[in-house]
Image: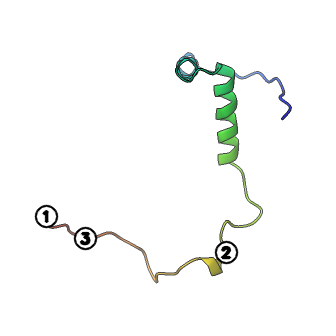
Amino acid sequence: MALQRIKVYADDSDLALIEAAAARTGVSPAEIIREGIHRIALAHRVWDEPFVTDQETVDFGGPITGPTSVSL
């Protein structure tokens, strides 16, 4: 994967968290930032097709709720 240099502005508190995570895990702050960018990019992607089709789902006929009361 080819990397491109970009400029990112971050709050001092966020930088402190990044540096602490880098020190704790033994990787560079840049690697923590790259992983964060990758995770957010994946979380916001849009799929061309649904994860499951209507035929692959189960219709329970209404909302699923937990027990209305619990006796101990």
Name the front one of labels 2 and 3: 2
Quarter location, residue 70 = bottom left
Q: How crowded is mark 2: few (under 14 residues within 10 Å), some or many (20 or more)?
A: few
As drawn, the residue found furthest toward the left would be 72
Position of 44 relative to 4 (above/below): below
Residue 34 in picture, x, y percent from top left? 70, 30
Q: In this view, does 54 lie to the left or right of 7?
A: left
* Residue at screen point 63% across, 27% down: 32
Quarter location, residue 72 = bottom left
Identity of the amino acid at label 1? Leu
Question: Pointer 2 and pointer 1: residues touching (CB < 8 Å)?
Answer: no
* Residue at screen point 64% across, 33% down: 36
Q: Which mark, by number, is residue 53?
A: 2
Residue 65 in picture, x, y percent from top left? 36, 71
* Residue at screen point 53% across, 79% down: 58
Residue at label 3? 68
Gap between marks 3 and 1, in whole Å?
13 Å
Task: Classify the position of the N terminus by image quarter.
Answer: top right
Identity of the amino acid at label 3? Thr
Position of 69 relative to 43 (above/below): below
Q: How many labels does the image show?
A: 3
* Residue at screen point 76% across, 21% down: 7
Q: What element carries label 3?
A: loop
Name the front one of labels 3 and 1: 1
